Amino acid sequence: MIAGIILAAGRGTRIKSTINNKVTIPFLNKPMILYGVELLSQVSSPVVVVVGAFADSVREVLKNYDVIFAHQIDQLGTAHAVAAGLAELDGIANGDSLVLVGYGDHMMFYSVNNANDLIAYHKKEGAVMTLVTANMVDPHAYGRIIRDKQGSVEAIIEEKDATLEQKQIKEINAGLYCFNYSFLKDNINKIGKSSVTGEYYLTDLVALANNQDKKVAGFEVEFKNVGIGINKPEELEESQKIYLQTKSNSS
């Protein structure tokens, strides 16, 4: 079984959305969240959508879609959101299940082939966690991928924590993941709270896996299949431009 979890609970403070959740904002005349739901519905079942801030706006957009809603009452980070989504898989998923996790504001560019290739690569590598990566010309503000000598993912270093040498790395974390359900279930509540933000971060699972001598794989795709996430109005405009350019170039 392959399940999907889409994170759509954040308040969207930087995009200044005061009535509706950010993921309901149109991306080329289609609510952002629909791209992720339509993608994961083709490769996974069930699809769980984690809602929180302005939850009713997300429920309304998805009223005709076959999804399960999980409510994240307090928005305490990405790992906290995934934990809320996982609770909806109790009694449905089993030890052999896989879980795809993506962000509601950053799934517009992925194709079904990308998702299926991610799943196949995860299985081939024998990983407990596989994350999509891409090379960016300007990776500023994105987490950099640190690989070991065998090519496995050793760490994800955020811009603010990176050394000058690490900032030269162009490979970034694109924010789409494939997990072994059993690993995710066993470790999601082991993640510590950030002393800076008070939140729980999904990317901390990289360190937990490595500490358990379990493999974290990085599945590199072309940037045109990743695009950029949307936190600010100018990023929405830029992302739509990139999308139109990449689609016209590939047609």
Image (cartoon, grey):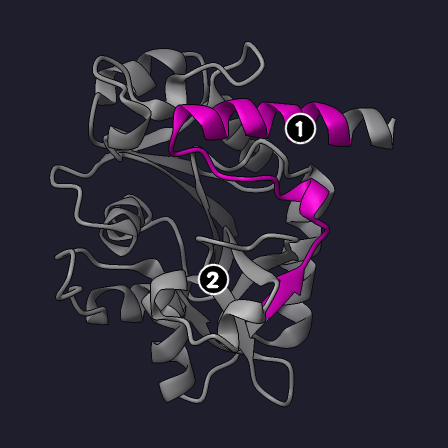
Q: Which amino acid type is marked by label 1?
A: Tyr
Q: Residue at horizontal 58%, vertical 31%?
A: 108
Residue 100 seen in render: yes
- Asked which secondary structure carries label 1, the reply is helix
- Asked which secondary structure carries label 2, the reply is strand
Q: Which residue is mark 1?
A: 243
**Magenta segment includes 235:** yes
Q: Which amino acid type is marked by label 2?
A: Phe
User: Which span of residues is magenta-colored?
Assistant: 218-246
Graded by Cα atoms within 10 Å as few (under 14), some (14 to 19) or many (20 or more), the crowding at tag 1 reads many
Which numbered circle lies on residue 22?
none
Q: Residue at horizontal 58%, vertical 69%?
A: 169
Residue 159 horizontal/vertical position (percent)? 41, 62
> Gap between marks 2 and 1, in whole Å?
27 Å
Residue 98 horizontal/vertical position (percent)? 50, 58
Graded by Cα atoms within 10 Å as few (under 14), some (14 to 19) or many (20 or more), the crowding at tag 2 reads many
Residue 37 horizontal/vertical position (percent)? 50, 29
**Magenta segment includes 79:** no
Which numbered circle lies on residue 179?
2
The one of 74 and 224 positioned closer to us in this rendering: 224
Q: Which quadrant: the C terminus?
A: top right
